[in-house]
Amino acid sequence: MCRIHVAERQGVNHIRETVIEGLASSSRYRHLTTGLLARTADWAVARHAKPGPALKAAKRKLHQVFGAYAVKLDSLEQHLDALEAGGETHAMCRRILKLHHSTAERLSFMELFHATIWNHCGTPGHILDLAAGLNAFSLPFSGLDPAVSYTAIEIDRRMVEAVRRFLAVTQRPGGCLWHDVLDEIPPSNADVALVLKTLPCLERQKPGAAVDLMHRLEDIPDIVVSYPVRSLGGARKNMPLNYRAQAQALAAACGRNIAFLDLSQEIVAVLSHR
Ligand SMILES: C[S@@+](CC[C@H](N)C(=O)[O-])C[C@H]1O[C@@H](n2cnc3c(N)ncnc32)[C@H](O)[C@@H]1O
């Protein structure tokens, strides 16, 4: 390689390292996996030749993907301490579910949400919950036996640690992996995968991510996907129509049948091999 190219490469590597360090020391993004920070830095250095603008662009990108959900997680540990000290499980879980936007907006119909899914899919033996957020804390409202195994995957370490503590204190089998679902999915014997309110977020990280993910979940008989009926700001913007069409296209692309479940508060579809 000629000297000019070597110098250019070193310059790009330096900007990339600066961006990764800037993200890893930011209070908002330091909890995300190093792989995601590196991926975002690569995206930013491909667009900006100087470290300052590249770091700014990388933070903007992460804000689009995560900022909106990064809700009041500061009190998470405190709630878990209370749960471990013997706090009433249902009351503590409700408080924790309120800390994440996705589960907070499901609080008023959480029991119905679970019942509708399990009526359709049958009682699972093992659930794999991808990009799970704090959904583990809805398990006490699921009507499922505590012996049902639950494995979650999430990219934000604060939530991963909270879910691990919750599973331990409630003695539920399973675990929670600090992992990027755009990477390989660890082998699983789950009979149901949950991909709740997450596909648009994954598509923003990597176009085509939804279909790729479905292919990587090929061995799981039922995949429950869901979408919100309105944006975080409250607007409807034809969302139900668009998301139903997206779910249908996704099922066709991965060769699964699709059934929409009868819920008005969230668009829920089961993609199955049946
Ligand atoms: C809209 S929330 C949905 C949370 C949960 N599925 C629910 O419906 O309650 C999206 C979640 O996905 C996580 N996430 C986003 N991208 C991810 C990725 N590439 N790998 C793993 N988790 C991811 C975020 O941290 C966030 O908790």
Image: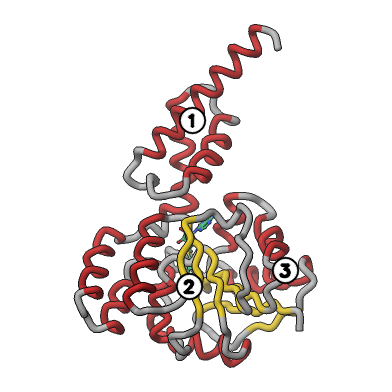
Dot 3, how many residues are within 10 Å of its Cα: few (below 14), some (14-19), or many (20+)?
A: some
Residue 261 location in percent, x, y?
A: 61, 85
How many numbered marks have been drawn onto this rendered protein structure? Answer: 3
Q: What residue type is labelled 3?
A: Glu
Q: Tell which circle, 3 or 1, labels the residue nearer the N-terminal end.
A: 1
127 relative to 216, above or below: below
Task: Tell me if the residue at label 1 has its CB under 8 Å from ligand 1.
Answer: no
Residues tagged 2 and 1 counted as in contact (Cβ below 8 A): no
Mark 3 or mark 2, whichever is nearer to me: 2
Pointer 2 residue = 174
Q: Is 253 positioned to the left or the right of 202 in the image?
A: right
Residue 228 location in percent, x, y?
A: 52, 71
Q: In which quarter of the image is the N terminus?
A: top right
Q: How far apart are marks 3 and 2 (CA)?
A: 21 Å
Does residue 227 appear in this view? Answer: no
Q: Which mark is residue 54?
A: 1
Q: Which of 150 and 2 is in front in this view?
A: 150
Residue at (31% x, 60% y) in the render: 73
Q: Residue furthest top?
A: 3
Mark 2 or mark 1, whichever is nearer to me: 2
Residue 46: image quadrant is top right
94 relative to 23, above or below: below
Dot 2, how many residues are within 10 Å of its Cα: few (below 14), some (14-19), or many (20+)?
A: some
Pointer 3 residue = 218
Residue at (55% x, 86% y) in the render: 263
Residue at (50% x, 86% y) in the render: 114
